[in-house]
Image (cartoon, helix red, strand yellow):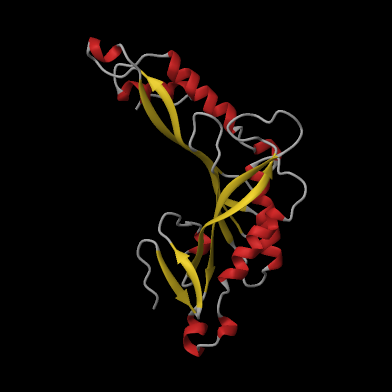
Amino acid sequence: MVSRTGDALGHVGGSHCLFGTHFRPSSPLMADLRDIIRVNDLIASALLSTGAAWPPKGPKATLQPITITAAFPYDVRQTAETDDLVHSVSYATIASSIRNSIQSETSPFQSLEQMCQHIFDSVLHSLSPLINELSLRIVQLKAPVHCKHIGLEATSNGTSISQYKTFFEGIQVPCIIGINKSERVETQDVLLDISISTDLPKLHAENWIDFRTIIRTVYEVRFLNLYLGVNDLRIVESREHGIPDS
C-alpha cells in the first residue's frame, strides 16, 4: 500500500512521482480499484496566439509559461505482487510525452482548449494501452491583465470529454464596500475566483472561452458600481449573469 497525504514524493514499482491533493479527477470512469497516478505542475512553454497580460500586437504568437498537472488511473497490484519494473510506470516518460507534445508543435495554439485537446490526442495515442483515460489541469501563468491565473480542467477517454471546467483565479477589482460613510470614500481591492463548468463532447472552437473578455467585463462592472457590502456584490453579480436571487 502506498500512502499519499498532502504533497510528498512517493514511488510505485520503483518509479518516482510527485503526489498531490489539489487536483482530484472525479470522472466516474476513475471510480474503480485502480490507483490514480499524478504528475503535478509540470512546467512547459507553449506558443499561444491569445497573448499574455495584453492582446498580441500582430500575428506572431507569444511563448507562454504554463503548468500542467496530469492524472490517470493505473492498477499497481501486479507491480506490487511481482516487484517487476516491466509493470511499473515511468513518470519521466509521462512527463516527457506531455511536454514534447506541445513544445514540438511548430504551429501556435489558438487557445488553451486547443492545447488541451492536442495533449489528449497525442498522449492517449502514444502511450496506449498504458493510458486510456487522462485528466489534465492546464494553468496559464501569465494571464490577461487584472487576473493572476487562468486555466482549464478536463478528462478524456480518447473519444469524449468530461469534467470540463475553465477557471479564473485572482481577478483583482476595485470596489467600494461598507455601510459607513467613511468606508465609501476609498476603493478596496477585491479578489474574485470564477469557474465555468460545462458538458462538451469535444473542445471545438465554437465552445472556446474568451478569457480576456470575461475578465474585462467583470472588472468594468465592479469598478463602475458601488456596493453596500460583500453580499450585495454577490447578488448583483448573479443578476448580471441571469441567476435569480436566492
- Residue 177 appears in the figure: yes
Task: Report the quarter where the C terminus lies.
Answer: top left
Which percent across, then down, holds residue 71?
A: 53, 61
Please name whichever residue, 16 or 160, is drawn nearer the observer in this view of the structure.
16
Toward the left, the furthest residue is: 180
Toward the bottom, the furthest residue is: 82
Q: Name above or below for residue 71 compared with residue 85.
A: above
Q: Name above or below for residue 6 compared with residue 105.
A: below
Q: Is residue 133 left or right of residue 1?
A: right
Which percent across, then down, holds residue 149?
A: 50, 40
Q: Name above or below for residue 8 compared with residue 178.
A: below
Task: Report the quarter where the N terminus lies.
Answer: bottom left
Determine the residue positioned at 56% across, 39% down.
142
Q: How many callouts does the rendering have?
A: 0
Q: Is residue 13 left or right of residue 236?
A: right
Which percent across, then down, holds residue 12?
A: 48, 77
Q: Name above or below for residue 215 compared with residue 82.
A: above
Determine the residue positioned at 69% across, 54% down.
103
The image quadrant of residue 50 is: top right
Determine the residue positioned at 68% across, 53% down.
102
The image quadrant of residue 143 is: top right
Which percent across, then down, holds residue 77?
A: 48, 81
Please name whichever residue, 164 or 23, is drawn nearer the observer in this view of the structure.
23
- Residue 196 appears in the figure: no
Q: Is residue 81 left or right of residue 235?
A: right
